[in-house]
Image (spheres, rainbow, N blue to C red):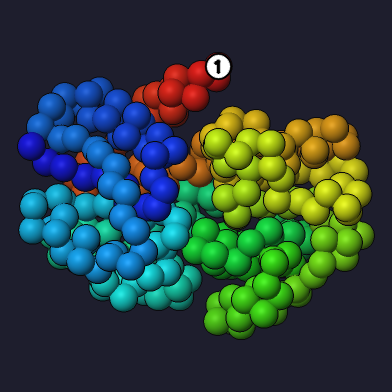
Amino acid sequence: MNIVGVIGYPVEHSLSPAMHNAAFAALGMSDWRYDKFAIPPDILGHSLQTLRDHGVIGVNVTVPHKQAAMQHSFPDTLAQQIGAVNTIDLRTRKSTNTDMTGFMDDLTAHGITLSGEKIVILGAGGAARAIAYGLNQAGAQIAVVNRSEERAADMLRSLAITGQVMSYAEAAAWGAPLIVNCTPVGMHPNSDQSSWDVCTPFPHGITVYDTIYRPAKTRLMEMAEANGGRGINGMGMLVRQGAAAFKLWTGIEPPIDVMMDALRSALGVS
């Protein structure tokens, strides 16, 4: 059996196994299986070596390991530029970042234009780094809102992005048509939480792209819609970045429609 999977802590919420295993089934790849592995941060290096020793072919990397995993793999040029990895081929220990491609491709699928636009990013972790890098490459103007302004500034500096670090109030008044949530705030089972400051009025008529996909409609998305805007969840990004990892491990192009249908079914949405 060829095993691949996802590592994180926690990782119980991940629905990646549903979409990858559906793709394996659709392609008749009965000797492949996708699992999930909960790995605490303090044993990341040891655990990756253990997985490799047990024949696991590759892993996706989710919070909180996306930056730390760089030290335990051989990141390609893109991952080095972003400063975070989300996919590792354990056979070679080579790693890359498919988050950026998955996100950018999904924005295109939703008809969102970027060049010259103002974009607010919530968060400064691994996913935020990939997304900020992709948005900057597309010519967008970037502002970052984060609990630690110093960490947000460090992210922009390390990515060589001429962006701004803002408060929630400053971001609300900036006039950006798109806010991208790159934090885990609002993720199941804490679905009643929002990454937007409750003391700051939410801007009117903007689009929120929430990288969270469980729940399918987050509190942040509901806030956008309640204020005349649009909410998009992270399902498309998850599927598209997963498809890139699938091809890297197997050499086969997966059926994205099958992966999306499996993810929707797992989430109980139409």
Q: 156 or 40: nearer the eye? A: 40
**Disc 1 crowd, CA 10 A, few/some/many (<14, 14-19, 20+):** few
Residue 259 seen from this side: yes
Residue 139, quarter of picture = bottom right
Q: Position of residue 106 (x, y in %)?
A: 55, 43
Q: Position of residue 38 (x, y in %)?
A: 32, 49
Q: Give the mark count.
A: 1
Q: 117 or 202: nearer the eye? A: 202
Q: Which residue is mark 1?
A: 270
Decide: is 263 above or below 127.
Answer: above
Question: Which residue: 40% across, 24% down?
Answer: 262
66 lies left or right of 29: right
Question: Which residue: 33% across, 67% down?
Answer: 42
Task: Classify the position of the N terminus by image quarter.
Answer: top left
Q: 192 or 145: nearer the eye? A: 192
Q: What secondary structure is found at the residue carrying circle 1? A: loop
Question: Which residue: 16% across, 42% down?
Answer: 3
Residue 222, quarter of picture = top right
6 lies left or right of 129: left
Residue 156 seen from this side: no
171 lies left or right of 132: right
Q: Position of residue 133 (x, y in %)?
A: 56, 67
Q: Callout 1, which amino acid?
A: Ser
Task: Classify the position of the C terminus by image quarter.
Answer: top right
251 lies left or right of 109: left
Question: Which residue: 32% across, 34% down?
Answer: 17
Q: 153 or 178: nearer the eye? A: 153
Q: Position of residue 249 (x, y in %)?
A: 21, 49
